[in-house]
Image (cartoon, grey):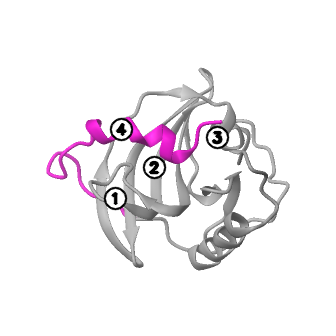
């Protein structure tokens, strides 16, 4: 299963200049952060209130909390990211189009990014289920980023993970 970090590492080289495209603002309340991926190293959410559909294409915001700061889209390590994602529901692919890295609660990077479309399997499966298929999340949604970060840290620190996770 590919994670946010694995999908986004290739996009570092494709990061565009801030002068080419304006910075985007992170989503504001009310948020509906639905869990889409949980692992020992990362927890991902899709903001259901940010879904924008145009034909088979859905744009939305994902919120990612990583166990350790890593360098993904930003030119420096961060452990919390908002990422604008694009899902092609007909082709069943997803890709990242914009990243906002948050360091110590402050936006430290805000720029468009380029990533190749990847199949909506594994890490993209629930994103596609919610955005493309209109499925309802089985787990409760989270209403704010502080609660999402706290819950993510608890999930990643859980002793329930096996040795291979």
Please give left or right for residue 31 compared with residue 103 in the image.
Answer: right
Alpha-carbon distance for marks 3 and 1? 24 Å
Mark 2 and mark 4 in contact? Answer it, CB < 8 Å.
no
Q: Position of residue 26 (x, y in %)?
A: 43, 65
Mark 2 and mark 1 in contact? Answer it, CB < 8 Å.
yes
Farthest right residue in view: 138
* Foreground label between 4 and 1: 4
Q: Which disc, if any, is residue 11?
A: 4
* Foreground label between 3 and 1: 3
Q: Which residue is mark 1?
A: 24
Q: Secondary structure at mark 3?
A: helix
Q: Secondary structure at mark 4?
A: loop
| Mark sitting earlier along the chain (2/3) | 2
Could you say which is closer to the camera, residue 163 or residue 152? 163
| Mark sitting earlier along the chain (3/1) | 1
Q: Which disc, if any, is residue 123?
A: 3
| Residue extent of the magenta highlight | 1-25
Alpha-carbon distance for marks 2 and 3? 15 Å
Label 2 packing within 10 angstroms: few (<14), some (14-19), many (20+): many
């Amino acid at each position: 299963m590919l994670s946010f970090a694995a999908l986004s590492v290739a996009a570092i080289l494709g990061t565009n200049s801030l002068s080419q495209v304006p910075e985007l603002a992170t989503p504001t309340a009310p948020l509906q952060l639905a869990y889409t991926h949980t692992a020992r190293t990362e927890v991902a959410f899709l903001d259901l209130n940010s879904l924008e559909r145009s034909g088979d294409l859905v744009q939305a915001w994902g919120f990612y909390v990583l166990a350790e700061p890593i360098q993904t889209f930003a030119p420096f390590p961060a452990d919390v990211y908002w990422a604008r994602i694009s899902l092609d529901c007909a082709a069943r692919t997803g890709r990242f189009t914009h990243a906002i890295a948050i360091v110590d609660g402050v936006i430290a990077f805000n720029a468009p990014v380029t990533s190749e479309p990847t199949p909506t399997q594994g890490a993209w499966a629930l994103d596609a289920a919610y955005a493309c298929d209109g499925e309802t999340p089985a787990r409760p949604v989270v209403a704010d980023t502080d609660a999402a970060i706290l819950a993510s840290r608890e999930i990643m620190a859980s002793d329930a993970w096996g040795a291979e996770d």
